[in-house]
Structure formats: structure tokens, C-alpha cells
Image: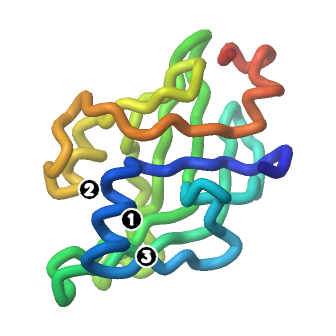
Amino acid sequence: MYDSDLVWGIRASFLAYVEVVGAIEVILPASRAAAGALRFPLAEVADNEFRYSGKVAFRAHHGALSLTIGDPWIRVRGNHDATMSLLHLTASHPDGKRVVVAKVAPDGATELVEAGAALFDYQYPVGAELDPVRFASRRLSTSHGIG
């Protein structure tokens, strides 16, 4: 992992499922990490927000599953309070619409919130654990209250 990258597997079972029945397209500057997780490079830090860049498209079932997400942001809001948002790109919103998908714990554990559950078509309930997120900006986090 590069010092400033965000690495997140979303949910390992989701990635494995899509790879079996469809395809995952990683759009630069995003890439795949060694263990199959997704890697997004740091683009900017602003107002307690770590902004990463890159996109990923998931396709399966002849288009019935079609999800494009990208540019994850981690927003630090308090001592142990952070959220992760993603751009959700669709035909009607080609530039994307930002959606808060998860709460992020100081150890990187992620928990799905309502808008995140909707993004995944409620295949995972609100409160479901997602894969942990690793972002090296957490090394700076003592001043931002995380970690």
C-alpha cells in the first residue's frame, strides 16, 4: 500500500460474486490491491476530509446488476466519528451523486448506513459490516481524532 492510498474490499463476498457472474472494471487512477481489494490514490485533503480518486464498475446478469462507484471520501467529524461517501454514477447522473455509504470506526471497521444499503439494492441491511477500510491518512489522524 502506498502511504496515501485508501484500500477497501467493499465486501469480499460481493467482489467474489461479481467476478464469478459478471465483471469488475477498475477505472484509473483506481487499481486492484494484492489481495483483490480496491486501491484509490489520495487526491486532496480538505476540512477534515480525505478525498481519493478512481472509479469501479460492477456489471452482471446482462445489466440487471450495474453499479459504478468512485472517488471515496473519508470525513472525520469527531474523536471517533467518521463517514465514507462515494460517487454513484448513473446514466441520469453521469458526473455522479455523492452518497454516504458507511460509518468508519477508528480501527477502519465499516458499517453500512441507509443510503449505502440502498446503493447495494438492500442486498445488505443497514448496520451490516463491510470490509475494513485502510487509509494511510489515519497516520495523520491523531490530529483529526481518529486512531
Q: Which SS class for mark 3?
A: strand
Q: Which SS class for mark 2?
A: helix
Residue under numbered circle 3: 24
Q: Which SS class for mark 1?
A: strand
Residue farthest along the bottom direction in this orientation: 62
Q: Residues within 10 Å of mark 1 (few under 14, many from 20)?
A: some
Measure the C-alpha gap from mark 3 to mark 2.
17 Å
Q: Residue at x 69, y 39 (%)?
A: 135
Measure the C-alpha gap from mark 1 to mark 2.
8 Å
Q: Residue at x 69, y 31 (%)?
A: 48
Q: Residue at x 76, y 44 (%)?
A: 45
Residue under numbered circle 2: 119
Residue under numbered circle 1: 88
Q: Position of residue 55 (x, y in %)?
A: 54, 70
The amino acid type, in three-letter code, at marker 3 is Ile
Task: Establish if 110 lies above or below 14.
Answer: above
Q: Residues within 10 Å of mark 3 (few under 14, many from 20)?
A: some
Please name which of the two marks, 3 or 2, marks the residue nearer to the observer: 3
- Which of disc 1 and disc 3 is earlier in sequence? 3
The amino acid type, in three-letter code, at marker 1 is His
Q: Quadrant of residue 120?
A: bottom left
Q: Residue at x 51, y 64 (%)?
A: 70
Please name which of the two marks, 3 or 1, marks the residue nearer to the observer: 3
Q: Are marks 1 and 2 in contact (CB under 8 Å)?
A: yes
